[in-house]
Image: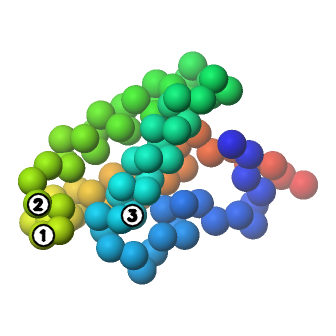
Amino acid sequence: MTKKKSDQNSTDATIGQSLKVRVELRKAELERLLASPATSERARGELAVALGEVIGLLTGDLDHIPKVVGIELNAWLEANKHVDEHHEFS
């Protein structure tokens, strides 16, 4: 995935949506990147770690996320919003 400096990452692009939607969209995006043959081995490791972290948080009633889990999910989104992101500098 190649991004230009002006492009907005998917985590920032979904601000305003529910936490459940934002996390599920980012998780699906990371899963697609992990499945892509174009993804480097280094990026695959980062993707696997990021996905492993969130899977344990996505249990129970996701329509009523406990505050402590919500804090961890927000932290996960922030920590992983640039995983496998590449920038072109002009």
Q: Name the disc covering residue 22, or none.
A: 3
Tell me how far mark 3 sits from mark 1, CA to CA. Answer: 15 Å
The structure residue drawn at horizontal position 31% and vertical position 68%, both measured from the top left corner, is: 19
Q: Which residue is mark 1?
A: 64
Q: Would you call the spot at circle 3 few (<14 residues within 10 Å), some (14-19), or many (20 or more)?
A: many
Mark with earlier residue (2, 3):
3
**Tag 1: residue type?**
His
Residue 63 placement (x, y as % from top left): 17, 68
The structure residue drawn at horizontal position 74% and vertical position 46%, both measured from the top left corner, is: 2
Query: Where 79 falls versus 52 (above or below)?
Result: below
Residue 8 placement (x, y as % from top left): 64, 65
Q: Is residue 49 visible?
A: yes
Q: Name the disc covering residue 61, or none.
A: 2
Name the residue furthest bottom: 16
Query: Which type of secondary structure does the marked residue at label 1 adopt?
Result: loop
Marks 2,1: beta carbons within 8 A = yes
Tell me how far mark 2 sits from mark 1, CA to CA. Answer: 6 Å
